Amino acid sequence: MGRVAWVVMVLLTVFAARLGWADVAVSPPSLDDPGRETDPAMLAGRLRLDGRVILRQLAFQAGRAEFRPEALPILEAIRRLLVADPQLRVRIEVHTDGLGATEWNLKLSSDRAQLIQVWLAEHGVDAARLDTLGVGKSRPVATNTTAVGRQTNRRVELVRLNH
């Protein structure tokens, strides 16, 4: 989503909030359009531009550190991105929604971040280029009181560590 589209979305969200609509959430620009998270060039561009990329489609089994099948094309895109730029170092940050105990969410997100790191290392990326951080529910970008908000908060972020 481009910056102009994000500004429009923010304005619409403010308008919707005044109307009392509950399931409206605003988050930083991401690659929410289907297929964009599987494009290594798009990921590289977002990392270059913003220093981070938000991946909402990299899905895990509920309550477990196991990938869902639809995560594999996104993992492959991340792998291709890192293979194409051997100097690039990233931190893999995994966020959960606000349900459950803080400690449990922190461990789950940490386990998931490490799972991504291991997958990438097993597929040819030097693990020394990959830091991990389990964030748990400590940095929500939307409300956790609605299903839409909780879905928005469940995300993986790649953060560029070198410039």
Image (spheres, helix red, strand yellow):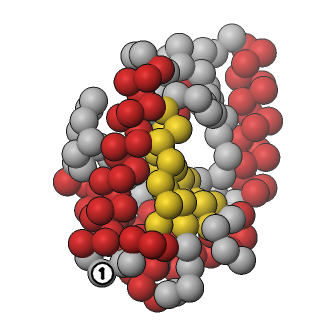
Query: Could one spot residue 111 in this view of the protein?
Result: yes
Q: How many marks?
A: 1
Q: Quadrant of residue 46?
A: bottom right
Instruction: Choose between 124 and 24: the one closer to the eye.
Output: 124
Q: In the picture provided, is 84 more to the left or to the right than 46?
A: left
153 left or right of 51 in image: left
The secondary structure type at the circle numbered 1 is: loop
Residue sitting at x 71%, y 77%: 163
- According to the picture, the residue beneath numbered tag 1 turns out to be 124
Of all residues, the one furthest to the front in this rendering is 128
Q: x%, y% of residue 40? A: 46, 76
Q: Position of residue 106 (x, y in %)?
A: 45, 31
Eyeballing the image, is 8 above or below 130? above
Q: State the image coordinates of residue 149 (x, y, percent, origin top left).
A: 53, 26
Q: Quadrant of the N terminus?
A: bottom right
- With 70 as the anchor, is 17 left or right in this view? right
Q: Residue at x 31, y 72 (%)?
A: 121
Amino acid bearing label 1: Gly
Above or below: residue 48 compared with residue 68: below
| Residue beneath the point at 36% across and 61% down | 117
* Residue at point 72%, 30% (across, down): 13
| In the rendered image, the vertical position of residue 18 relative to residue 138, given as above or below | above
- Where 121 sits versus 52, above or below? below
Q: Residues within 10 Å of mark 1 (few under 14, many from 20)?
A: few
Q: Viewed as shown, does residue 66 lie left or right of 100?
A: left
One can see residue 154 in this view: no
